[in-house]
Amino acid sequence: MAKSNYPPYGIDYPDGPTGRFSNGRNIADFLAQFLGFDNPIQPFAYARGSEILRGVNYASGAAGIREESGFQVGDRISLNRQLLNHKTTISLFSLLLGRNVGATKDYLNKCLYIVNMGNNDYINNYLLPQYYSTSLVYTPDQFAAILIQQYSQQLRTLYSYGARKIAIFGLGLLGCIPQELAMYPPTNGSSCVEPINNAVQLFNNRLKPMIDDLNSNLSDAKFIYINITSISLGDPSSIGIKVVNAPCCMVSTTFAKGQCAIRKVPCNNRNEYVFYDNFHPTEILNFVTATRAYNTTLPADVYPMDISHLALQ
């Protein structure tokens, strides 16, 4: 059910609905553009032949660090399975490069990797006790610790496959997304569900130490952290945003709850909204996030460098 290959998704994307959970381009699209690519990175399902040498996108709706995250919406490709898909791509790389192990390794060492995982381990796991026992078994701090431990191992696996330049995106203010606001109305005058933001921050707080650990213990590793919470702060009206707590599209209340209802006309002032559906940002927000991750002006946004500097390493 976690699919967005239907209208009104992609209403502002040149190819229409493609599976991007937005009205237009996503963060990866903008980063590819900033890096000088003429076209978006192809998804693993469709990448063929020499085009895989440009890069491959393994993203999957509702996927998480934990294998079970998102099971209630049907099949999805977890981070573990995405790593297996990447291993398949590396085998194809080797064939294209004449089965030259050294050439394959050198190629992968130069690639830039963008990893944006963990949101679904909260939205589609820890915050849904009707489907998952994690919030009954683990305190927020324990869950964050377990999640980081597994994530760190997965990133070490990515490194073992040849990755050296890796940008890790932190989690956003999940207590401010429309879906959580609908499920847990804020109290005490807050505009967000602060217990959720506090739980997520326990995970984010562990990302910098994880980055330091990976960089210290893995030879030639260059991991960086993109602080989405920092990027999210500030006055949204400065970029013309007027609506911060409601979706632009009409969302489904039955099938794929919180996603855009099929073929319903969305708002026409999409650049004034933070959220397109109950979970995902609009293109304008993706642009701002990608811009600040790529070439930051605030030290708090990235650690220890931004993506533009990582790409040059």
Image (cartoon, rainbow, N blue to C red):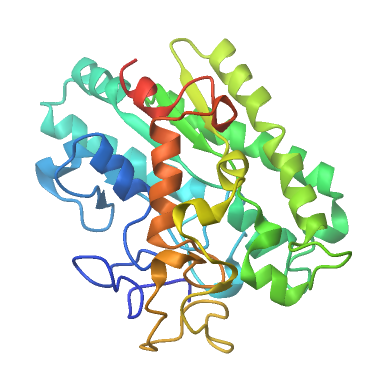
At 64% from the left and 72% from the top, the residue drawn is: 179
Rendered view: 60 above or below 264: above
Q: Residue at x 19, y 65 (%)?
A: 14
Q: Position of residue 186 (x, y in %)?
A: 80, 68
Whole-percent x, y for residue 144 in the image:
75, 42
Quarter of the view holding residue 253: bottom right
Depth check, front residue: 42 or 283: 283
Give me the residue at 61% from left, 73% from top. 72
Residue 35 seen:
yes
Residue 25 or 124: which is nearer the viewer? 25
Q: Residue at x 79, y 63 (%)?
A: 133
- Residue 271 image position (x, y, % from top left): 40, 65
Q: Which residue is at the front of the view, 12 or 53?
A: 12
Q: Indicate the quadrant containing the C terminus: top left, top right, bottom left or bottom right.
A: top left
Apparent side of residue 262 relative to residue 33 in the rendered image (left or right): right
Query: Image check: 87 left or right of 53?
Result: right
Q: Is residue 156 left or right of residue 140?
A: left
Q: Nearer the viewer, residue 80 or 292?
A: 292
Residue 76 vertical position relative to residue 300 in the rendered view, above or below = below
Q: Position of residue 112 (x, y in %)?
A: 33, 30
